[in-house]
Image (cartoon, rainbow, N blue to C red):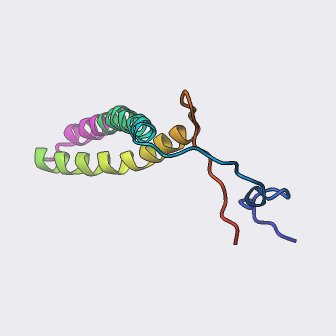
Amino acid sequence: MDTNPYRAPAANVAERDAGPGIEATWGRATKVWWSLIWRAVLFGGLAGMLAGGVIGAILGAAGVPQQTIATVGGWLGILVSIPVGIWVVRSVLRKSWSDFRIVLIPVSK
């Protein structure tokens, strides 16, 4: 018995006709790109500033040198941006635009 929770349901999606699809035009690519960029910049920036501000305040209160605070804050901002970036990609993958949406279809093996 297969207990893999990530396997497609019994009616394997890859075996169904995915339909004709539509062309990945420059306009559609631009819509997806813009959706990714503005969310990543806004939410990544806010999360990075919040994390950097909190750790900066804590380290500053502890008497840590300014250079160390800046280094730690920079690395923390990068680390925080990784899960935020993944969340942004997931939210864009679930989005619908005026004439299309992105669908993930498993590859038949």
Answer whether residue 62 is magenta in the image. yes
**Nearest to the observer: residue 38 or residue 64:** 38
Single out the residue that lies furthest toward the top. Answer: 98
Residue 34 locus on image (x, y percent): 38, 35
Residue 90 locus on image (x, y percent): 53, 43
In percent of the image, x 35 and y 51: which residue is there? 79
Which image quarter holds the N terminus?
bottom right
Answer whether residue 70 is magenta in the image. no
How many marks the image carries: the answer is 0
Most frequent secondary structure within the magenta stretch = helix
In the image, taking residue 73 as reference, residue 46 lies left or right, namely right
In the image, taking residue 11 as reference, residue 103 lies left or right, namely left
Residue 6 higher or lower than 49, as above or below: below
Residue 52 locus on image (x, y percent): 28, 39
**Nearest to the observer: residue 29 or residue 58:** 29
Residue 90 higher or lower than 10, as above or below: above
In the image, taking residue 6 as reference, residue 57 lies left or right, namely left
In percent of the image, x 45 and y 43: which residue is there? 25
In the image, taking residue 13 as reference, residue 76 lies left or right, namely left
Single out the residue that lies furthest toward the right. Answer: 1
Residue 103 locus on image (x, y percent): 62, 46
Q: Which residues are magenta?
A: 52-64
Q: Picture quarter containing residue 9?
A: bottom right
In percent of the image, x 39 and y 34: which residue is there? 43
Which image quarter holds the C terminus?
bottom right
**Nearest to the observer: residue 70 or residue 97:** 97
**Nearest to the observer: residue 82 or residue 9:** 9
